[in-house]
Image (cartoon, helix red, strand yellow):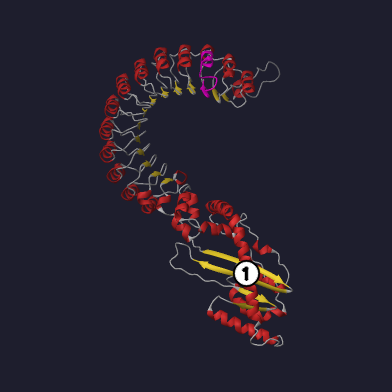
Amino acid sequence: MFANGEGGGMRSGGSSSSNGGAAGASGSIELLCPPSGSSSISGSASFSSSSGASSSNTHSTAVSSESNNNSSSSNNSTGGSNNNNHNPSLQIRHHHSNNLNATAAAATSNNNHNGSGNLISGICSSIWRSATFGSAAPVVPPTPLPDPSPKTMESSSDSSSLSSSLSPEEQHNQRTVATGTEVPLQDQSQTFLGATELDDELIKQLPKEVLLRVFSYLDVVSLCRCAQVCKYWNVLALDGSSWQKINLFDFQRDIEGPVIENISLRCRGFLKSLSLRGCQSVGDQSVRTLANHCHNIEHLDLSECKKITDISTQSISRYCSKLTAINLDSCSNITDNSLKYLSDGCPNLMEINVSWCHLISENGVEALARGCVKLRKFSSKGCKQINDNAIMCLAKYCPDLMVLNLHSCETITDSSIRQLAANCSKLQKLCVSKCADLTDLSLMALSQHNHLLNTLEVSGCRNFTDIGFQALGRNCKYLERMDLEECSQITDLTLAHLATGCPSLEKLTLSHCELITDDGIRHLTTGSCAPEILSVLELDNCPLITDRTLEHLVSCHNLQRIELFDCQLISRAAIIKLKTHLPNIKVHAYFAPGTPPAVTSGHRPRYCRCCEIL
């Protein structure tokens, strides 16, 4: 996943001038190693040319002396009109030095006005290109040099040593001087989204802290691409501080144990949140390595990691004392021992999910409740061994509990829910769906003690009646979502109480509530919640619902979705009319195909009527 990149930093500048038929060009180039380089290399070079004479001033001592000799020989070949006291080569250097100073002063003045704008725009565009395509450097297509004239043949060999290190802009200036005509800047055209060398320079001027802050907002793929830009970016992109939060769900099929071990060794104490949801190849050895090196991890998602056992949780509890949330959903090999390990080593644990861990029982929950008294969220969906004793332990030792999911914990009764309601006054979300033994006593206890309740899921609780929901509507003013599916004993009276007592009701499920009629929906729509708040209403298999219900729902301006499967008394015309008033609404309905007419005359049909219906 991680790839090392190579690169370096370069700054270049150039200028050109012409006067009275004599063309001249001068420029400089400086090579610098990136801040992460192991050595410091710097140098500069400048060149000037006039009347076919080319020389180098300051690249090095050897180059300077060679250029002087070449310049002298060039002067002798022109007729010897100048003596040693008046060297034209020196005059040319002086002349172009003045031009270079003037050009540099003008460029400095312009940069003072435009520097800040170029800095910000260049940084933004270059970081975006690097994170998206893996390179910030522009692509410069090579352009062949024009054929040299006879006058420049003598100086071409002297300048060849410098041409290989010149930037494209300086090569363009040099060719302009040699030919006496302006060469189109096609060789400088950028083919990489309009990138310029200025972008790279601006990026390299950014402090290390700024780049690290930028990288901290990138995902895994973008960080890996940035690591391939250059050595400097490779070091920063793969720095542990950029990998504090990792989600590998998109790579779950490709993630194996060695990848997790490499991430652990690289991130170490910086890693705070890791999601391995669905990575079924990850086993105990990888989690053990993770726990050994990442002691500061706070959020860990191991849901659907089928190979995880109690050995993993033992390592986590031993080394990760700062853990606050762990997800073990569908880890079928987890037992009560894992909860005991977590209770001993993770006292700051606030969230845990052991849904569909069928081996979890009341013993593990009791140990967890005793050791993790800060627990806020507990989910044990599908854990059929969890009973009233487990819930009573949670209510006794974890008074700050806010979210509790007991879906399909079939042995739960009113006694545990009543104690839970009395001890956990901060409870906000409760799911007791498929807990068929619960009665109105549970609802009345919740309405008496849990006034902050905003989500209640009681699907399949067939013993609930209008009395329990009347108590909820009287005291629970903050209810936003309610799932009453298959609460077959409730009537329109429940909807009347909810409409007047729950002004924040946003989502309501009434599927398979066969006693609900159009009058109940009318009560709901005339309440304070329906016109502006109600957004989802599910009425599947409500046989008494007719087109009048849809007429009442026209006043619910915020309604976004309605479920009408198997509502036999709903017509297509009523749905079309509803959509004309609420054009953004999604209506899910199903209409059985009509029975084809019987054949009364003619020859015998090839298929019977049943086959025709199919």
- Asked if 520 appears above or below 505 in the picture, the reply is above
Please name the residue shown 73% across and 69% down the image.
181
Tell me if I can see residue 139 in this picture: no
Quarter of the rendering containing residue 598? top right
- Asked if 502 appears above or below 243 in the picture, the reply is above
Camera-nearest residue between 367 and 43 = 43
What is the span of residues highlighted in magenta in the rendered image? 521-538
Camera-nearest residue between 221 and 115 = 115
> Residue 286: horizontal and vertical position, in percent?
35, 49
| Rendered-image quadrant of the N terminus | bottom left
How would you rate the neighbour count of disc 1 (Cα within 10 Å): few for under 14, some for 14-19, many for 20 or more? some
Quarter of the rendering containing residue 36? bottom left
Please name the residue shown 50% across and 54% down the image.
225
Position of 55 with respect to 285 (left or right) is right
> Residue 239: horizontal and vertical position, in percent?
42, 54
Residue 522, magenta (yes or no): yes
At label 1, the amino acid type is Leu
- Asked if 168 appears above or below 202 in the picture, the reply is below
- Secondary structure state at the residue bearing disc 1: helix
Residue 30, magenta (yes or no): no
Position of 145 with respect to 108 (left or right) is right
Residue under pointer 1: 100
